Image: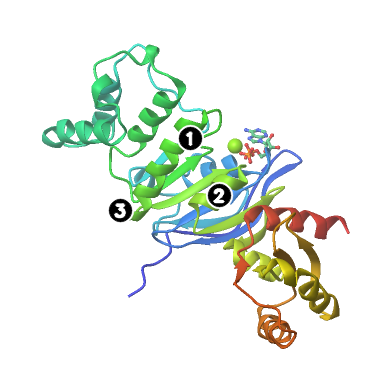
Amino acid sequence: MEKPPAIVANGLTRRFGDLTAVDSLDLEVRAGEVLGFLGHNGAGKTTTVRLLNGVLTATAGSARVLGLDPAVDGAELRRRTGVLTETPSVDERLTASENLNIYAELYGVSENTIHKRVAGLLDMFQLADRANDRVSGFSRGMKQRLALARALLHQPELLFLDEPTSGLDPVSTRQVHTLIRELSRNGGHTVFLCTHNLEEAQRLCDRVAVLEQGRVVALGTPTELAHNLGQGVRLELETAPGSVAAALEVLAAFRDARDVSQTDGHPRLTLALPVRDNIPQLVSNLVAADVPLYRITPQEPTLEDVYFALHENKES
Ligand SMILES: Nc1ncnc2c1ncn2[C@@H]1O[C@H](COP(=O)(O)OP(=O)(O)O)[C@@H](O)[C@H]1O
Ligand SMILES: [Mg+2]
């Protein structure tokens, strides 16, 4: 049986005076998925996380998170969710181990499991050898890993990560990405990941919701989003050096082919077609013209393509 969704928002709205930070948000997050909540600064990501955790009340609309109403059962809900806030603070005066122990007690982790759980997390987050060092001497990446470990102490089913890698160097970013992927694959966690970073969303998320001025303007996998935007498919094909001219001739005569270009000095061509179903006809035309085909690869649309196409559509 399919699990019920982890999060359902219906018309969720939050205003601050005249400003509508979250505007009639309708969203369903599936149990076990990594949902990317993608938007510029000020789009309403953090406000949404706060609404969904019941630390902020909605102006209108409602939400169900793990079957609970955050506006009513916030305290109970927060025992089952883990939140990595935008600027998490770990206690610099304490050691890594002390930071985790204090939180474990706060979260009510039972006395006899605290030690094992803290040790396990320190290990997983590659902090075991620094467990008894004060956090004040830690790098930014180490502090972020510690904060992420802290959000997992009570083994939450649902994890909110608010810009988990902003301000981290590439190596720390990669470590945090690996951890997030492990959490969703092996730990079965549902992850609600706020980010303004397209590459991060593309790399980590099963689906992406694009948020603009408090509204979800698109939702789906990058491929689905591209399809909905009528972006078509991009192909790369490889022929023999002596057949590039003949291939270009076929492509020029093929009404649906757009954006044809040749990779400098290589017998490789790229082009765009409106739909996948154009591919067989194109291949057949190339074969009929005696153009040898060594490789033909559809290129999955990237989130970047989609994101910029969304903005272009709006401007035109
Ligand atoms: N407590 C608050 N009081 C007034 N305005 C706020 C408050 N929190 C957020 N906002 C405003 O709401 C909008 C959305 O903010 P936020 O949710 O933090 O966006 P994001 O996390 O996507 O950067 C912004 O314009 C921000 O200035
Ligand atoms: Mg934010």
- 228 to the left or right of 185: right
For residue 201, the mark is 2
Q: Say few, some or many: other residues with alpha carbon within 10 Å of mark 2 (under 14 / 14 to 19 / 20 or more).
A: many
In the rendered image, residue 83, in percent from the top left (x then y), is placed at: 43, 39
According to the image, label 1 marks what residue? 173
**In percent of the image, x 36 and y 37: which residue is there?**
151
According to the image, label 3 marks what residue? 186
User: What secondary structure is marked by label 1?
Assistant: helix
Position above or below: 214 against 234: above
Q: Marks 1 and 3: which is nearer the front?
A: 1
In the rendered image, residue 195, in percent from the top left (x then y), is placed at: 57, 43
Position above or below: 166 against 301: above
Q: Amino acid at mark 3?
A: Asn
Whether residue 71 is visible: no
* Marked residue nearer the N-terminal end (3 or 2): 3
What separation in Å lies between label 3 and label 2 (alpha carbons)?
Answer: 19 Å
Quarter that holds the C terminus: bottom right
User: What secondary structure is marked by label 2?
Assistant: helix
Position above or below: 190 against 95: below
Q: Quadrant of ligand 1?
A: top right
Quarter that holds the N terminus: bottom left
Relative to the observer, which residue lies in front, 68 or 166?
166
Position above or below: 217 against 141: below
What separation in Å lies between label 1 and label 3 (alpha carbons)?
Answer: 20 Å
Q: Say few, some or many: other residues with alpha carbon within 10 Å of mark 3 (under 14 / 14 to 19 / 20 or more).
A: few
- 222 to the left or right of 52: right
Residue at the farthest front position: 242
